[in-house]
Image: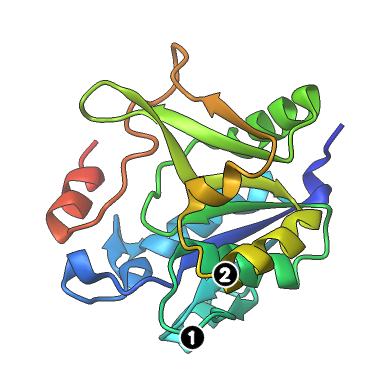
Amino acid sequence: MIETGDITGVILAGGRGSRMGGVDKGLQNFNGLPMALHTLMRLQPQVGEVMINANRNLGAYEAFGVPVWPDVLADYAGPLAGFLTALERCETPWLVTVPCDTPLFPDDMVARLARAAQQQDAEIAMAAAREEDGDVRSQPVFCLMRLELMESLVKFTHGGGRKIDAWTALHKTLVVPFDAPGDDPKAFFNANTLAQLHRLERP
């Protein structure tokens, strides 16, 4: 059984926010609070520890009261840089990653990923969800992974690898669908633009 305390969560807030005009996405207002703070409040009850991966406005993120770590790879190397940064700081057997721009992800997500990983003895469990076009697709930034994958990720990123799917394909990866009756169809919608963010705010 993978216990809640065996899992550290990381909020990925290290991107450039280029589709949102270069603003720091995690600090954009969502229903009265910074989006990354919503994400933190949703993630905290699901894991033992939480950290944030951010590359700017570190003071603003530190004000949320959890450790903040910038990328260990230079030049905004994408989500895998956040994965690697968090694995290097993680002190539990498992790490789960969530992006800062999807504030409605399920409040039982980590438990469902952990249950699936345990049952299938997987190294990585990745969420999949129905997108706006109706198709169920994997959501690679929502990933539960074993701490011992750090060495593999160091090797992959140092070799120039940047695509999450290309790395997870090297390991026993399980895709866990979140499309059961009762699952919120908007749970995994993310806000890449301010217009999308305002649309998410509406009930």
Q: Residue 110: horizontal and vertical position, in percent?
A: 64, 39
- In which quadrant will I find the C terminus? top left
Observer-nearest of 68 and 14: 14
Residue 73, located in which quarter of the rendered image?
bottom right
Q: Residue 95: horizontal and vertical position, in percent?
A: 70, 54
Task: Please state which amino acid type lies under the numbered disc 2.
Answer: Gly
Protein image colouring? rainbow
Q: Residue 170: horizontal and vertical position, in percent?
A: 64, 44
Q: Residue 28: horizontal and vertical position, in percent?
A: 29, 68
In this figure, which residue is indicated by the disc labeled 2? 159
Above or below, comparing residue 23 to residue 203 in the picture: below
Residue occupying image coordinates x 60% and y 33%? 108
Above or below, comparing residue 130 to residue 50 in the picture: above
Residue 186, located in which quarter of the rendered image?
top left
Q: Quick one: which residue is furthest to the right in this view?
A: 1
Residue occupying image coordinates x 49% and y 46%? 165
Q: Is residue 107 left or right of residue 94?
A: left
